[in-house]
Image (tube, rainbow, N blue to C red):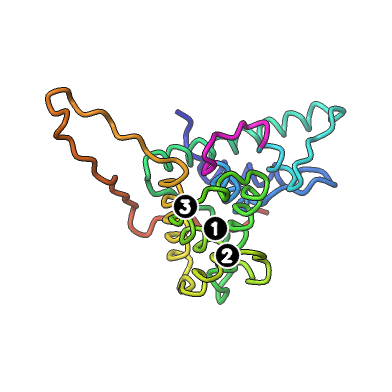
């Protein structure tokens, strides 16, 4: 099992993203986290070869084959760190367990939506490139999607009347902690639809009397990640 990224890993990942040469446009840390959640919520697994290029370039352009050995080594290290986060989020979704979303600290006085917007933008990018999640016709997806897309300007949500109707009923998060909780709750609710859990087979002696129960979701009180951009 791969380990979760610690603060040193996050700093290293940020440094590697900062070193990606133009014209490539890498995602920032918060957008990467939202993007990975969008990838993992697809009803069918998305191969890494399809989503990894989007980490170092929002348009999905791959580094040219003429890149030097140093650049290729840095890319390999960057991908390894991102795949560790991918695995961590995958385990959390599979177990319907709380995870700490990467939400940027945008400073005192800023609205919580301003901090969440990069995360939501990463999620939206994954939804655009891999549309199978949004193609699922299930009303249970509308509210959790609204909890994420509510952070966008309404004018950016074209042809989404049902989504906008639900967004209009939602109160914006009061602070970053509440915003983080909403993100995790939305992700796990969507996982119930796109990644339904299989009930374990009951023991033979109990077969026929087994009753399925909804898995309990727990989170550490006050647990969420807020970070500043590394220099």
Q: Which residue is mark 2?
A: 115
Q: Are marks 1 and 2 in contact (CB under 8 Å)?
A: yes
Judging depth in this view, the residue of 23 and 69 nearest the camera is: 23
Which residue sits at x=59%, y=44%? 132
Question: Foreground: 81 or 50?
Answer: 50
Residue 183 percent across, percent down from the top left: 47, 57
Q: Earlier in the sequence, mark 3 or mark 1?
A: 1
What residue do we see at 82% from left, 43% from top? 21
**Residue projecting furthest to the top:** 204
As measured in the structure, the alpha-carbon distance from the residue carrying label 2 to the one carrying label 3 is: 29 Å
Give residue 76's position: percent from left, percent from top: 68, 30
Q: CA distance from mark 1 to mark 2?
A: 6 Å
Side of 68 where 158 appears, left or right:
left
Residue 154, image x and y in percent? 63, 71
- Report the quarter where the C terminus lies: bottom right
Comparing labels 2 and 3, the label whose residue is closer to the camera: 3
Residue 63: numbered disc: none
Q: Residue 14: give x, y in percent of width and height.
A: 65, 47
Secondary structure beneath label 1: strand
Quadrant of the image occupied by residue 211 = top left
Vertical placement of 112 versus 7: above or below? below
* Badge 3: residue crowd in 10 Å (few <14, some 14–19, many ≥20): few
Task: Name the residue rendered at 47%, 52% in the picture.
Answer: 138
Q: Quadrant of the N terminus?
A: top left
Question: Which residue carries the number 1 mark?
Answer: 103
Question: Can residue 206 be seen from the camera position used here?
Answer: yes
In this rendering, the answer to whether 226 lies above or below 170 is: above
Q: Which residue is mark 3?
A: 138
User: What residue span does the magenta drawing correspond to?
Assistant: 40-50
Q: CA distance from mark 3 to mark 1?
A: 28 Å
Label 3: element kind: loop
Which residue sits furthest bottom? 109
């Amino acid at each position: 099992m791969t380990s979760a990224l610690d603060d040193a890993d996050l700093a290293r990942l940020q440094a590697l993203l900062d070193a990606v040469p133009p014209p490539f446009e890498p995602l920032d840390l918060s957008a990467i986290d939202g993007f990975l959640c969008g990838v993992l919520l697809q009803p069918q697994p998305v191969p890494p070869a399809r989503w990894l290029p989007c980490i170092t370039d929002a348009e999905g352009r791959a580094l040219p084959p003429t890149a030097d050995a140093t650049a290729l080594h840095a890319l390999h290290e960057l991908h390894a760190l991102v795949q560790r986060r991918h695995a961590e989020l995958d385990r959390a979704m599979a177990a319907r367990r709380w995870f700490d979303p990467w939400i940027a600290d945008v400073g005192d006085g800023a609205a919580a939506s301003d901090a969440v917007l990069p995360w939501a933008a990463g999620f939206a990018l994954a939804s655009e490139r891999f549309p199978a999640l949004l193609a699922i016709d299930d009303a249970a997806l509308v509210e959790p999607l609204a909890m994420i897309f509510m952070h966008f300007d309404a004018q950016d949500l074209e042809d989404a009347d049902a989504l906008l109707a639900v967004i209009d009923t939602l109160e914006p998060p009061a602070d970053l902690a509440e915003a983080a909780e909403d993100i995790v709750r939305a992700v796990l609710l969507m996982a119930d639809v796109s990644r339904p859990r299989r009930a374990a087979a009951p023991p033979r002696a109990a077969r026929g009397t087994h009753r399925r129960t909804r898995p309990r979701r727990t989170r550490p009180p006050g647990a969420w990640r807020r970070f500043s951009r590394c220099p």
